[in-house]
Image (cartoon, rainbow, N blue to C red):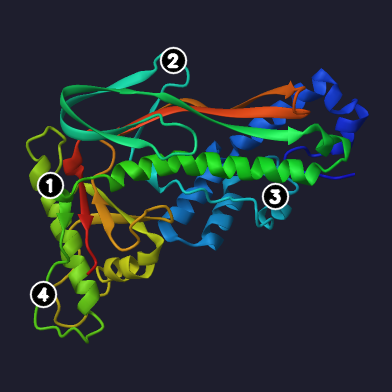
Amino acid sequence: MYKGKIVSDWGLVERMGGINNPAVCKLLRGAVNTFLNQPNTAPFKAAAQAFTSTGDVTAARNALIQGFATSQDFPASVLEVLDKYHQTLYFDTAWEQIFKLIDLRNSNRSSFDILDVISGLTFALVPEGQKANIFKMSGAKVTVDLDMYAAGLGWSRRLFMNKEYWTIEDNAIEFRNKAFESKAQDHYDLIEAVPATYDLAWQAVTGAVPSTNENYVPIRDINTINKACENILIRLQDLGMSVNPNSEFKILSPIQNLGRIRRAIGMVQQPFAGSTTQLNYTVSPAYTLMLTNTSDYYVILPKNKIQTANRMDLTVFSDFDITAFTDIAVGWQWYGGAIGELKQIVRCATL
């Protein structure tokens, strides 16, 4: 009998009468919801953090294994699961390192407020299949509404009758990946919508270093990162965020710049002879595959007035559609996000 990744033993489903048994439908829905929210558990979060910080799939895999603290917590089939190419273990969560999370899951709130807003951006619900619209906002106080986002997952009853359990599970895996990708994309869209006012040109090289020198590009990148941090500190100094030269910044970069950002940051520890060029501020990278512009990167003072709120995790509700002979499962998420202060972000050029 097929041993699945969502349902550990489909034989038990058959022995209980299959999908025609309402009790089985309830148990199956519970198993799907447990699977859908695995990325929110500590081991999967650790894997996602490792991937976004290093861009290394192996690091994500190792972090997931280490995330299971005891032998009782460690699933017997975890190594098998890790080797399944379609089991995405390192969900793109770099945006979570940028946004301050407000947990509203146990509340009756459907919005949150950001105070003392001069300018900012927020997104709103759009028809399924389209990207979130980005809206400008201004004023001393802005209320950010949380919207519900949904997508349907339909399983023909014939899949159950023909015992094509692998197809059912593969559909659920793809559904989960798309749901988390969609939520991440909404937040990246906010960052990429920052106006050109906050663009920073690639800064000039320090010293008489020719363009053919191996350190020419990293020195210019270092100067650019330093200037971006400096701009953010100066812009925010009177806005009550308690920023100072010891503040910690994030570099949000497309994965295409991974080697380049590593090289620049690495020069902090390994400056070449006679050089005084190095990063002057505390920065750490986060890499993503989901930025539209794969050349530029962002230097960001995270959290503060860059905020997101979660009212309901991805949850599936199901029913049988007799007209389509299909078990309809609809997944819902309830969240909202906003950038309340654009001065926390600088878009940096690499050319």
Amino acid under disc 2: Ser
Label 4 sits on a secondary structure element that is: loop
Amino acid at circle 1: Leu
Residue type at tag 4: Thr
Q: With respect to residue 119, does 297 lie above or below? A: below
Q: In the image, which disc is placed on residue 107? A: 2
Q: CA distance from mark 2 to mark 3?
A: 34 Å
C-beta proximity under 8 Å, tags 4 and 1: no
Cα separation, mark 3 vs mark 4, equals: 50 Å
Q: In the rendered structure, which amino acid carries the disc numbered 3? A: Val
Question: Which residue corresponds to the image point at 90% horizontal and 32% vertical from the top-left?
Answer: 14
Disc 1: which residue: 233
Q: Secondary structure at mark 1?
A: helix
In this figure, which residue is indicated by the disc labeled 4? 206
- Residue 245 visible? The answer is no
User: Label 4 vs label 1: CA separation?
Assistant: 22 Å
Q: In the rendered structure, which disc, 3 or 4, sits on the residue that comes first in sequence?
A: 3
> Marks 4 and 3: in contact by CB < 8 Å?
no
- Image coordinates for residue 338, horizontal then vertical, percent: 30, 33
Query: Which badge, 3 or 1, comes first in the chain's sequence?
Result: 3
Residue at which label 3 appears: 78
Q: CA distance from mark 1 to mark 2?
A: 35 Å
